[in-house]
Structures are given as structure tokens and as C-alpha cells.
Amino acid sequence: MTIFSKIIAGEIPSYKIAENEKFFAFLDIFPLREGHVLVVPKTETDKLFDLSDDYLSEMLVFAKPIAHAIEKAFHCNRCGISVIGLEVPHAHMHLIPINSSNDLNFTQHKPQASAERLKKAQEKILAVL
């Protein structure tokens, strides 16, 4: 069972943004930028493109209102999307408020955010979701 499956099951606490029967979205505790959200399928699949076509398209539709909320909640040009998939063997996408392509640079240092900052970011997104 991956760390994401444990978060989805409630075994590990998270800063939940949205959930339905197939997907779970929560804040990354090591964010590249404030408001960095992970969107994860509840089906434990290692690689994003191993998901069925329907599941993959539904994941993007699930992420769409979250991306719009991120754009409203944080000062940014847009919500960027990235699929890296090397950190955890469970398919996921990153939704990140960005102003430049460097804001999606995963080689940057990603310090752990404080509980206070994460709660504030969660409240900002949920207020406009």
C-alpha cells in the first residue's frame, strides 16, 4: 500500500481539497509553491498513462475546478500541471500556481510547509472551490 493509499484511507492525515468515488486531492506538504495540490486516483496504479482512457479523462475533469480555484486563491498567471511520478509509485498529478515555467522546476528545494501555512492554503482554495 502506497503512502497515497494510506492518505486516501485516512490512515495518514492530509489537507484535503476534494474527493469523489474515484479521486482524492490534497495539499502537498512539500510544496513548490503555496497552494500546490496533488490529485490522486483511488485506484493504486504506478504510472498515470496506465490508467484506462475513461479514468484518465475523468481525472482531468475532476482536477479542473480545483485548478480554477487555485488560480483564484493565489496570485499567479495560471495553474500549471505536472506529472512526474518518481516520488511515489502511485499515479498522481501536481496542480501548482505558477508565474513562470521555473515554478514547475522539481529540482528546486522543497521545504516542508508548516501546519499553519498548509491550513491557510487549504482554507484559501476551499473558499473559492
Image (tube, rainbow, N blue to C red):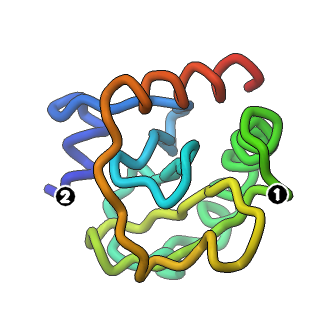
Q: Position of residue 97 (x, y in %)?
A: 69, 54
Above/below status of 80 relative to 49: above
Looking at the rendered image, the quarter that the N terminus falls into is: bottom left
Cα distance between the residues tagged 2 and 1: 30 Å
- Report whether 68 appears left or right of 38: right
Residue under label 2, please give it.
2
Determine whether the residue tagged by mark 2 lies in a helix, strand or loop.
Answer: loop
Query: What's the mark number on residue 78?
Result: 1
Q: Position of residue 125 (x, y in %)?
A: 65, 29
Above/below status of 103 relative to 16: below
Front-lying residue, 85 or 52 = 85
The mark nearer the N terminus, 2 or 1, is 2
- The residue drawn where x is 51% and y is 44% is 23
Front-lying residue, 48 or 118 = 118
Front-lying residue, 6 or 105 = 105
- Report whether 62 appears left or right of 93: right
The kind of residue on which mark 1 rests is Arg
Q: Position of residue 57 (x, y in %)?
A: 71, 63
